[in-house]
Image (cartoon, grey):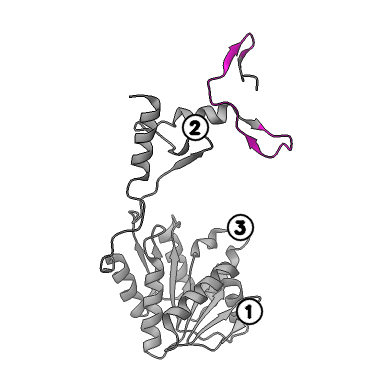
Amino acid sequence: MSRGHYLDEMRRKFLAGIGVPKPAPFVPDEFQKEAISSVANSVDTLVVAPTGSGKTFIATEAIKAFMLLGLRAVYTTPLKALSNTKYNELKKMFEPQYKVGLLTGDRKIDTEAQVVVATTEIYRNELYKSSERSSLVVLDEVHFIADSQRGPVWEESIILTPSSSTLLMLSASISNAKEIAEWIEEVRGKPCRIITKQDRSVELRFGFLHPDLGVLPLTDDRGRILKEVLHYYGSSDLDSTGMRLRGGKFSRPRKGKRGWRKKRR
């Protein structure tokens, strides 16, 4: 098989299965059911699952369960842009039956609504005012608690949230869930349940966008980096600004008297 045909076959395998899935009835995973049941029973719950597993579904179902009881909820995110996105998503989902508000450093909309989307910093600030009274608090991206600069915001949010409220904490990248849950139990004086999902719902593949050859898998069938990728970086240098990588000719460098060197352009 020629190298070109080999690369075509590798590319076909790499892209196989990518696209819009066939329509099918939605069936929640067991970990989603378990998490929703835990929160609905007012148990602080830490959910650790890979990206794309459906953690947002857990949050929205939990919010719905609390609002059906006439209780308020707050959904916090680490970024204003993400808060705006979640605000628009929840408005489409819950209004007009329930009101959805927004609370960030720039915008304040219906802050007394049944569910309010807020940045975590603003939620923490509201706790210092002793004015926050949500029965359910969703802390999205809770792994920020490990961030050296912003981590204290999440720590204080957890500590200051009244123990009468229920915490639902979501993350895709916490590695010490047991340690964090034990700390939460200590500072809040109530149990914290850990629910994890190990396998990825959406397979993660590593690829490389070659300027001449297009999309390629990063490695071959044996797990070795494709030589086209190695040759690209091996024949590259910085441009005149010294900041950008500039690709060279994609052929093996020639060996000169002083060792391997690049071909002249």
Residue type pointed to by label 3: Ser
The reply to whether callout 3 and callout 2 are in contact (CB within 8 Å) is: no
| Cα gap from disc 1 to disc 3, whole angstroms | 27 Å
Residue 194 position by quadrant: bottom left
Magenta span contains residue 254: yes
Residue at which label 3 appears? 148
Residue type pointed to by label 2: Val
Residue 65 in the image, given as x and y percentages of width and height = 36, 83
| Residue at the image position 58 percent from the left and 87 percent from the top | 131
SS class, disc 3? loop
| Cα gap from disc 3 to disc 2, whole angstroms | 35 Å
Mark 2 burial class by Cα count in 10 Å: few <14, some 14-19, many 20+:
some
Magenta span contains residue 141: no
- For the N terminus, the image quarter is top left
Residue at which label 1 appears? 107
Magenta-highlighted residues: 238-259
Whichever of labels 1 and 2 marks the residue nearer the N terminus, that label is 1
| Cα gap from disc 1 to disc 2, whole angstroms | 46 Å
Whichever of labels 3 and 2 marks the residue nearer the N terminus, that label is 3
Residue at which label 2 appears? 229
SS class, disc 2? helix
Q: Is residue 28 above or below residue 211?
A: below
Any part of residue 192 in sight: no
Residue situated in front as seen by the camera: 100 or 184: 100
| Residue at the image position 42 percent from the left and 79 percent from the top | 93
Any part of residue 14 in sight: yes
SS class, disc 1? loop
